[in-house]
Amino acid sequence: MEWAMTATYEVIATGDLVPSPRNARTHDRKQIRQIAASIEQFGFSNPVLIDEANVLIAGHGRLAAAQVLGLKEVPAIRITHLSDAQKRALRIADNRIAEKAGWNMEILASELADLSSMELDFDLEVTGFEVGEIDIMIGSAGGQEGLEPETAPLPDPDLPQVARAGDLWLLGKHRVLCGNARNADDYATLMGDDLAHMVFADPPYNVPINGHVCGNGQVQHREFVEASGEMTSVEFVSFLRQAATLSARYSQDNATSYWCIDWRHLPELHAACTGVFAKWINLCVWCKTNAGMGGLYRSQHELICVFGKSERGHRNNIQLGKCGRNRSNVWTYAGVNTFRPGRMEELRAHPTAKPVAMIQDAILDVTKPGETVLDPFLGAGATLIAAEIARRVAYGMEIDPLYVDVVLRRWREATGQEPVRALDGQTLASLETAVSKETGQ
């Protein structure tokens, strides 16, 4: 077949372009916004195709995006060698043939994983993939093999006790403060000018550890610093309200907050959070694979209240399974009383430990890579490890220096990196050495 192509490149006013009445391709608002985001980030890298009368052959979506952006001119390639029938056929082929392309999923996942680990000044959704899709593909690519999500170093009084009240620690992009979840100054120190996109809070339930959590087993824990059974119901509501209010103050307007509680104290948590958050999004149930202690019925669940700070739409990466995340409000994960690898280490690390995988899934539900997760009751650091795996940033607060030491060592063991004390830039290892020399430990 012989043909002679006649095409010229030019810049043309958007008002001079004529959409074809025979264009069969449709573009919804969401796709137009995606095209507009691409143009904003990368420029108008794909010129529209027009004929001698300025009628669009290809690029109707790009023109609509340009109009959304208020662009006065766009680049165009003018084609004048085609017959009317050829132009109509090309208009279809330009869209249809592109649909028949596929993906090398291994390369795609690797590219997305690499991009997500970079200091980007743009959102990965500009690639056209949803956050849920990106997270699933990155997860399939691996890259976090060094992390052991369900194990933690044990609180060991024989190890050097490094953390002190008021210390801020830098763990890569993450931050950990030995501070009080009810102290506004501590939040200011931890958060700086940042606001959290999500809160995951697992406060003490105002239940004594001995006799309720530890039982008569071989693993015994000391009582929590506060809210370990010593508070009245009114005092516990006040305790929770103070922490909820401050965590909300340091959250984005569309942030989602997850608050863990047991069935006995659900009324107190609800009372505490009423008025702090604009809406109660859902009540999730952590269904453990094994039952624990109990009276008439053995307890096999805990509750997670999901709140929205404002009436603004919260991020939803689930979208009824559209992007591959199929989730309900019943979460089935093994508890610490389930016999499995790492179970004893997890139990020794913290008496009420939550599964890293459960927290990670919650993080993936409502945040995107690089966003910040605040945990005002960090405990043994499960939220920190979950955020590390999910490629999010964790800002955690823990009042007990013993558990701050656990968190720091747990992250170091998982990542191979050294936590750094913000005050003076000293590493955890150097401070452990110094304390050992001072105390003879």
Image (spheres, rainbow, N blue to C red):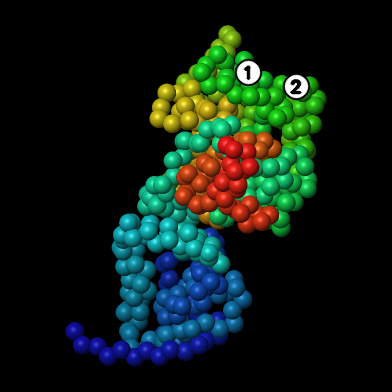
Q: Nearer the viewer, residue 355 or 381?
A: 381
Q: Which quarter of the rendering shows the C terminus?
A: top right
* Structural distance between the alpha carbons of marks 2 and 1: 13 Å
Label pair 2/1, CB-CB below 8 angstroms:
no
Q: Quadrant of residue 173?
A: bottom right
Q: Position of residue 228 (x, y in %)?
A: 70, 24
Q: Classify mark 1: residues with Cα within 10 Å, few (<14), some (14-19) or many (20+).
A: some
Between residues 414 and 15, which one lies in front from this camera angle? 414
Front residue of 232/106: it is 232
Instruction: State which quarter of the image contains the N terminus.
Output: bottom left
Q: Is residue 265 visible?
A: no
For the residue labelled by badge 2, is the local secondary structure a helix, a strand or a loop?
Answer: loop
Type of amino acid at the residue the image marks with label 1: Asn
With 247 as the anchor, is 97 left or right in this view? left
Identify the residue at image location x=63%, y=21%.
Answer: 209
Residue 190 drawn at (x, y percent): 69, 50
- Amino acid at pointer 2: Glu
* In the image, residue 47 above or below residue 155: below
Q: Quadrant of residue 206?
A: top right
> Dot 1: what SS?
loop
Label 1 belongs to which residue? 210
Q: Position of residue 406 (x, y in %)?
A: 57, 38
The residue positioned 59% from the left and 31% from the top of the image is: 157
